[in-house]
Each structure stands twice: as C-alpha cells, then as structure tokens.
Amino acid sequence: MHTLTATEIADRVRAGVLNPRDLHAALLDRIRRRDADIGAFLQLPEPTQFSTGGVLAGVPVAVKDNICWQDQPTTCASKMLEHFRPPYSATVVELLQASGATLLGKTNMDEFAMGSSTETSALRRTRNPWDLTRVPGGSSGGSAAAVAAGFCPIALGSDTGGSIRQPASCCGVIGFKPTYGAVSRYGLIAFGSSLDQIGVFARSADDANLLFNVIAQPDPRDATCDPSAIAKLDALPDNLAGARIGLPAEYFDTDGLNAEVKSVVMTAVEQLRARGATVKNIRLKNLKYAVPTYYIVATAEASSNLARFDGAHFTERTAADDIAALMSRTRDQFFGEEVKRRIMLGTYVLSAGYYDAYYARALKVRTLIAREFADAFAEVDLIASPTAPTTAFAFGERASDPLAMYLSDIYTISANLAGIPAISIPVGTDAGGLPVGLQLMAKRNADSSLLTAAKVCEEFSGWRNRVADGAGEQ
Ligand code: GLN
C-alpha cells in the first residue's frame, strides 16, 4: 500500500474499495519498522478522522512540525516548544481535514526551520532514505524523507529560502514552493514572514497538483494570502507547448557546482527541449547578491518573530528572580546555537547605526533581484538550474561551518526574495545513486506551469512515484 499515490488512494477510498483505517494501519506498520532508522517523524498521534469523501479522501498526509495542529505538539524541533500544544489549527491543516485527508503525524525539521540538513533539530536526527549515512536536506527534512520512504504519498513543508526544494532534491521527491501569498501562512510558526511559504512534497506531479489545489485558498486570517490570480488546473497537461526555458550563466558557471549534478541537470533540460521547449542562455547578474541579501532579511525578520519565545508566554521557562533574568536564561537554555546565531545577526542588522548599512540596503538589493527576474520572465517562461550544488552530503560535513551550510541554498534563495514560485523535480542520480533535483522557477502566479513541467519530466526521468525501499523491503 505504501506505493499508492494520493490520487489512487482518494479514488479507491471514494469508490469504497480501500478502507482508510486499513491503509493507515499498513503505513503505521511500515513506519514502525523503518522510522527508527530514518527518523522522519516527531509525533504520530491517533488520527482525528478517517474520511471516505473529499478530494483527499483517506489520504495520509505528514505535516512539518512548525505548522499548528490543534492540541497536538507543535515543536519546531526546538526545546523551546517541546511541550507546546497550539489551541488552534493552521488554515492548511483545516483545509486538509475538510478535504478528507488523514493527518498522519508531524515531521522533523531544522530548529525553527533554520538550516539545510535537519541537523539543527534539537529533538531527533533524520537520515536520508536513499543512504542512511547522508542528511535528508533541510529544513523540511522529515517531510521529504517521509514521502521518499513511502510513509505517506504527500506532505506539507515550509520554504523560506529553499527548505522544501533542497530536501526534495536530496530525497528524490518533488518539492514545490508556490508563489508567495498562494497559500495561507496562518498557523505557520513564523521565521521570515516576507519569505515564508507553505508548500508540498509528492512523488508524482499529479499528487503535487492535487495537494496544491487543496491548500491554495484565500484566507482572511492572512492578509498576504491571495491565490485569485493563479489558474489552478484540475488535470495537468503532459506537454510544455513551446515553453521558453532560460539558463542563467550565473547558475551554471560556478565553482561550487558538482560536475555530475550539472550534467544530470543539463541532460534533463535537453530532454525538455526534445519535448518542444526552447532553451536560451540568459544573464541574471544580481544573483550573486542573493545569499547575503537573504541572510540579512531572513535574520532580521527572525530576530523579531522569535522575540515572542521569552519564557513569559506559552513556552518553556527557567526559574529566575526577575523578569529580565527569566527571559535571558530561558532563551539561553532552550534555543540552539544556530537559532541564537540568527537572532544575534538579525538584531545586529536592525540596530541603530547599522540598520541603513545592512537592512535598508538589503531591501533595495532584494528589489533589484525581483526586478531582474521580472525582466527575465518577459523573455522566458521558466528558469532552470540545479536545485542544490551537490547531492545529499554526509552528517557533520557542513554542520560546523555555517557559511558552507548557507551555500547549500545558493540556487533556491532568490525565488523567496522575489516571491516567485519554484519547484524541485527529481531527474536522475549521481554515480553513487543519490538523487539530483532540477529546479524550475516561473513568474508570479504561474504555479501551474511548474507542475506541468514536473509532469513532463516524469516521462523521461523514470522518477515517477519512486520509493526508497530499504534492504528487505518490497
Ligand atoms: N536553509 C535556509 C536557512 O537556513 C532556508 C531555510 C528555510 O527555507 N526555512 O535559512
């Protein structure tokens, strides 16, 4: 049952030939056998419903643990929120429930979504289902691993600078970050509010489309949420019909790009050309500023967003004689190193005297990057690149060098700065069998063109609905 797609599950459940309880029990059995090694889940509560109707009738869905689910632990993989149970559900969780999904569990992540390997989780280690000595990517590493391992066909993640696409690339699944504002952020524990976007993991393009259509709904509780300009598709076409693909020189002529990754990505682009796309080289000269710009904007917003975890409200707290000591000791004890680094960087770039030099300047560069993309999309429909410069790396390889870790996201960060949709599509492997992701970006609200491209890639990649089966598994 673990190889059924969401589309197949919903069809069978609605037809009365598959019982959602039986499916859940079968997947739970697989999770019990394999998740001790993989570590995708933080919590596996009893499902609150087994529905036999709806678009996602009986489809098990995993949810990243920074998305609130009423009365269930929602930890952000942090000691700070280890015992937090939100009194309300995120809009996306309500939409899943309303569409008949079975909420399967909460998945591991980098603490407060800060990282690219899931190694900063304070609660658990997650391993890559294709190679247990490798990281699953991050920060949504648990969701990516759960879908790759066949624990569930689809999952939700969040993407602030690549946290859906990069782990999707590492784990050989589709990872889709919609246009900023396509999906409500209500109930997503904020990291960088102007960059954060909830999106989907799936093993097939049709499943990604199905889940996207469920969650891309207007929501009065998130003022930035407005999917009305997105033309959602009930069924994805299987051709690209003359799409123009741009290849930015800045993304391919870089030292850090692994040669095997580059060649797999170029082969995929050739295949898209053979199926009717046109391909041209383009320049995006401001791309080199994306990583520094992101690490100013994202940390500034994080320092403000994470100020609420102060020991005085709904989080853990330490004993102290006065309120100032309570706050500083609580934050010292319950935040991890990477979170503290981000809060301090963000506080610094917002402080008097440095605000103009860093934060205000970063906002200007962000505008330049967004404009450059808008200009490029006058000439091309899609921009192609690798999703990440390498395949999944080993534990510890980048954990002690924040800068090396930050460079895992050189290809993904600019889409968040520009607010445009982007997708990672599995298109091949390196010599060691580790998956390689092709990233495609499109202009705002052209989300469906990315899902269509993912569908076309399935024709030649052999990566439709591929599950990482461990030794001894069927
Ligand atoms: N890896 C990036 C970071 O650490 C992006 C994280 C994310 O998208 N949440 O900030």
Image (spheres, grey):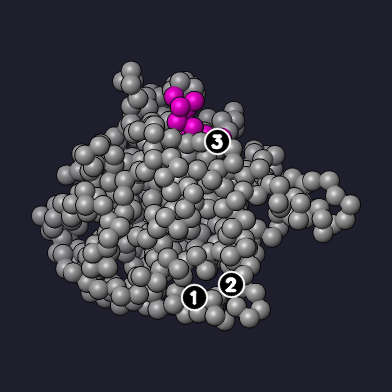
Residue drawn at (57%, 81%), measured in percent from left and top?
356
The N terminus sits in image quarter? top left
According to the picture, the residue beneath numbered tag 2 turns out to be 349
> CB at mark 2 closer than 8 A to ligand 1?
no
Mark 3 lies on residue: 124
Residue type at tag 2: Val
Q: CA distance from mark 1 to mark 2?
A: 10 Å
Q: Residue 46 occupies which quadrant of the picture?
A: top right
Tell me, yes or no, if residue 415 can be seen here: yes
Q: Determine whether label 1 and label 2 are within 8 Å by CB.
A: yes
Circle nearer the N terminus (3, 2): 3
- State the extent of the magenta-drawn residues as a range: 34-42
- Magenta stretch holds residue 38: yes
Assign a secondary structure to mark 2. helix
Q: Quadrant of residue 421?
A: bottom left
In the rendered image, residue 302, in percent from the top left (x then y), is placed at 59, 61
Assess whether mark 3 and mark 1 are in contact (beta carbons under 8 angstroms): no
Residues 324 and 197: in front is 324
In the image, 105 versus 316, the foreground residue is 316
Nearer the observer: mark 1 or 2; the answer is: 2
Q: Which residue is labeled 1 in the image? A: 362
Which residue is at 27% across, 56% downward?
257
Looking at the picture, which amino acid does disc 3 mark?
Answer: Arg
Question: Element at badge 1?
Answer: helix
Under 8 Å from ligand 1: the CB of mark 3?
no
Relative image position of residue 63 (x, y in whole percent): 51, 42
- Residue at far top of view: 472
Residue at mark 1 to residue at mark 3: CA–CA distance: 34 Å
* Residue 318 image offset from top left, x and y in percent: 79, 46
